[in-house]
Amino acid sequence: MARMRAVDAAVLVLEREGVTCAFGVPGAAINPFYSALRARGSIRHVLARHVEAASHMAEGYTRAKAGNIGLCVGTSGPAGTDMITGLYSAQADSIPILCVTGQAPRAKLHKEDFQAVDIESIAKPVTKWAVTVREPAQVPGAFQQAFHLMRSGRPGPVLIDLPVDVQVGEVEFDIDAYEPLVPYKPRANRRQVEKALDMLEAAERPLIVAGGGIINADASDLLVRFAELTGVPVVPTLMGWGAIPDDHPLMAGMVGLQTSHRYGNASFLRSDFVLGIGNRWANRHTGSVETYTKGRTFVHVDIEPTQVGRVFAPDLGIVSDAGAALELLVEAAAERKAAGRLKDRTAWSAECGHRKGTMLRRSHFDQVPLKPQRVYEEMNRHFGRDTCYVTTIGLSQIAGAQFLHVYKPRHWINCGQAGPLGWTLPAALGVRAADPDRRIVALSGDYDFQFLIEELAVGAQHKLPFVQVVLNNSYLGLIRQAQRAFQMDFEVSLAFENINAPADGDPVRGYGVDHVAVAEGLGCKAIRVKSPNEIPGAFAQAEALMAEHQVPVVVEFIVERVTNIAMGAEIDAVNEFEEVLCLDPALKKETGWVPAAPAKRHPQPVDA
């Protein structure tokens, strides 16, 4: 037992719980905590330029590796409120991060002290637990409880608020007697699994929907093993992408209104049974419940009891950690297979595989300004199987999900539900901090990139290199496309005549922000690409610059102002605005395929 400040005890707990990296911004009310970090020297600290960015860095750090928990730290008041977006994003996607904030002294909490705010109440709706610790002796226990909650059941974030006088209060604490609490994870039982397999065996055209819970449980190998035992094709959700490799014969494609494949939607619409594991039936995946569920039987496995039946009532619900459920499913399926009690799914899986090979979207365009589809085609060609993509919302993300390929778990790092603009760049920094060797490509539209562009300086200062792809159409592209329904194009253009751009007729001049100049001013390297034949060389040059200078390298693509990306209101009514391919005439009637028509471009940009 030793006498120490409460914050010194907190840092010892962080070490014992496995924390090795923090992201944050120091300030007066959190300086005691920073002094404890400095005194121990065991936890690396990455100085962000914005506290919201620090929370997204923590998200990227957690999402990068199984077992990671990202830590973000900020001073009182605005630092805590800045973190709310990161907490919301983490809560929505079941990502554990720990936010630690400083606070005014206890005696002044009710006196509207400078930068004092009730962050506990503000954060409660977007965390598993938010607490202002009011006694120094409760600090070690609060941190222990935080990690227990973050790891138990459905993972999620926690906020601990520390008044400055609580931080410096002295406590008796013995780290040698400390042990992390064992997390609680519900487990399926054999009877439930047997019933689920009975229902699967009764079906003719079953599918497995693989959600992000499989990634969280580090159970991708079990998923693939179960699919191979049963011969059942797999539909990954956006959060589960990578749980089965894209080129696996049983990977049937993603389903949804936006981030989906034509073949994935077509195969789902042919299915009669769906086993969902670790997914939450998100609306961008399902569209209307009526269309999604019609003619199908459902089993839903999820770690969170309140998720089962939340969107629609499954025919069988099982509350279980995805990994625990898959262990039993593999065991039971292996026994049935050995006894010859599993159906032969060869014809059904071949049917799904045939669609996968024939129902494609065109990506090869040679025009200038560039079409974004060509950029993704070249990304697939250059970056290959071992690339980790990081992205948030927007047409860049939606098209990325339609055209890119992902082969490993945690190689598609994406904020699925919240989708805050600005997320991509800091999240990529967090991924890099978690893994110094991974090949990382961040993917942004110009607006996402501009939201937290200052964080490029963090990558330069702390030597956190990655390739940042920016598709610049000088538009809020997704919102512009949505405004088509209102016959308008209102306040979504980012274009202006940049007075500092070359006056030689360069087409970039009217695109507004000079991202190359900004990136270089923040200590990074940048390349601008305007034509298809420049793309391969630009990627090679970017990786060479990244390796030489150990800083983020921005590759900006000047793409056409208006490209409508495939999406729709229902999974059976996705609008294909650009040319699609159907390599099998027999599928044309079944899928409603029609010859490609000129892209729909209404309304035209007002400043075109």
Image (cartoon, rainbow, N blue to C red):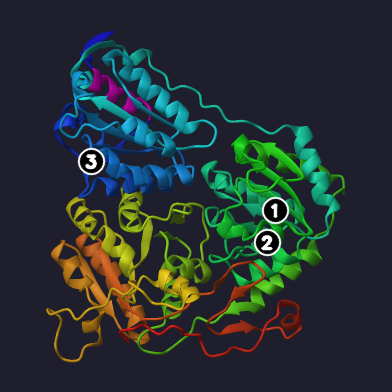
The percent coordinates of residue 556 (x first, y second) are 29, 74
Mark 2 touching mark 1, by CB under 8 A?
yes
**Mark 3, residue position:** 78
Q: Main secondary structure of the magenta part?
A: helix
Instruction: Please name the residue that numbered disc 2 is placed on.
Output: 250
| Residues shaded magenta | 6-17
Q: Which mark is residue 227?
A: 1
Q: Is residue 598 left or right of residue 450?
A: right
Dot 3 alpha-carbon crowd within 10 angstroms: few under 14, some 14 to 19, many 20 or more:
some
Nearest to N terminus: mark 1 or mark 3: 3
Mark 2: which amino acid? Leu
Kind of element beneath mark 1: helix
Q: Residue at x 47, y 78 (%)?
A: 564
Q: Nearer the viewer, residue 39 or 306?
A: 306
Q: Residue at x 33, y 16 (%)?
A: 138
> How many residues crowd around disc 2 within 10 Å: few (fewer than 14), some, or many (20 or more)?
many
Which badge, 2 or 1, is on the more N-terminal residue?
1
Location of residue 502 with respect to 482 vertically, above or below = below
